[in-house]
Amino acid sequence: MASQPIALGSYVPAVDGLRALAVAGVIVHHLGMFGFASDIGWAGVWLFFVISGFVITNSVDGVAYRGQSFSRKLSIFWARRVRRILPLYLLMIGVGTIIVLTVPGLRYQVEQLPYLLTFTYNFHRLSPDYSHTKLFGHYWSLSVEEQFYLLFPLIYFSVAGRARVAILVGVVLLAPGIRWIVGEVAGATISPASAPLAVAMFSPGHFDAFALGALIAIFRERIARWRFSLPLAAASTGVLLAGYLAACVAAAADKSAGEAILAGFQINASGTLAQVGLYCVLNVLFATLVVGAVVGWRPLAIPLATAPMRYLGRISYGLYVVHFPLLAVLLGNGDRSVGALEVALYLGTLLAICHLLYVYFERPIMEQRWGKWRWGRPGTAAT
């Protein structure tokens, strides 16, 4: 295990590799043809949440924010988020809008635009009027992230030291309770079948994922120096996972152990156990992976920090935003079998598009090479 300290605001290459794993999981899930990997791939979104908490907190401790006033820190933070998120997001919303306006039978999806543009799409997905679409359906997670990004700097820049840590720990402890309350309320007022989706879409119930990543960033130097950091995190994951698996088997007496475990890891799994416990397990597991990247644990850090993995991590936002609409365009809506050659064509096209978007669209905007942008700190790329 490496013991070199991670400096404030420093880049951790293996974290980009974790981004690559996260987006790969989501793509495999939506392809739906890789067995258990497809069944559990949806969890890649929560890996993104933990990574986002780490990266954002790591970045706000960088030189761009030092010595700045509260209002200036807010402007730098939000300007960087705008540069990083909005251009490609709005581009894909525009492409999707053109499609729904020109393809017969899709015009009704225009009603989703107000929610997409205000980053409240996760709440719209709880509406009985919501109709799922591969053009826009996956953008709910971006709404969750943007809601976190709206609140995070207001709190983080308002307090310091132990107060920051106390608030983040409080979020980690309270979020499971929020999930439980949302599940109970949705089950009682709407229907039991609606509870899993309500829990998944209610953003404050998932801020613990971001908070865990933020705590790792705050204590990253100590984590990197202390040799028991990763063993302790791994042990915590093991205990939680073992307890969750045992609970899944005990709660499903009519199923075999394997069937009960598989059911416990399904997307939007029903029951209080899954709605509260599963997300806790996933968040701690993914936090452990981030700790492994921070300490430089070689079996994890070396493969994740390879050039291909780091590059896939850098273009992971584009891969996430583009993959679902492209899936609908090239492979349809899942109403027919798809062969390996078609999947290879889809993946190759996806990589090519996202590479071009990153090189000629995203990166120039992040590096402020289009016009005379002066949002945030001049000459620095958005994180």
Image (cartoon, rainbow, N blue to C red):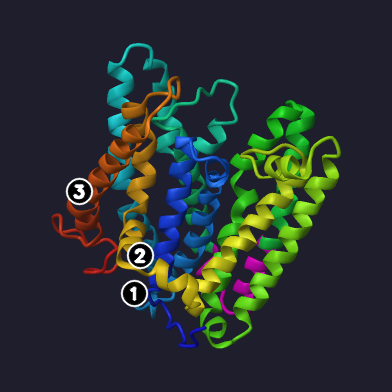
Q: Residue furthest top?
A: 104
Q: Main secondary structure of the magenta part?
A: helix
Q: Is residue 101 visible?
A: yes
Residue at 69% in and 30% down = 194
Q: Which residue is mark 2?
A: 76
Q: Secondary structure at mark 3?
A: helix
Q: Residues within 10 Å of mark 1 (few under 14, many from 20)?
A: some
Q: Quadrant of the C terminus?
A: bottom left
Image quarter for residue 333? top left
- The amino acid type found where label 3 is placed reads Leu
269 shown above or below 68: above
Q: Which segment is the magenta one?
A: 155-171
Residue at 67% in and 76% down = 232
Q: Which residue is mark 3?
A: 356
Residue 162 at x, y = what percent? 63, 78
Q: CA distance from mark 3 to mark 1?
A: 29 Å
Q: Secondary structure at mark 1?
A: helix
Q: Which residue is mark 1?
A: 64
Q: CA distance from mark 1 to mark 2?
A: 8 Å
Q: Are marks 1 and 2 in contact (CB under 8 Å)?
A: yes
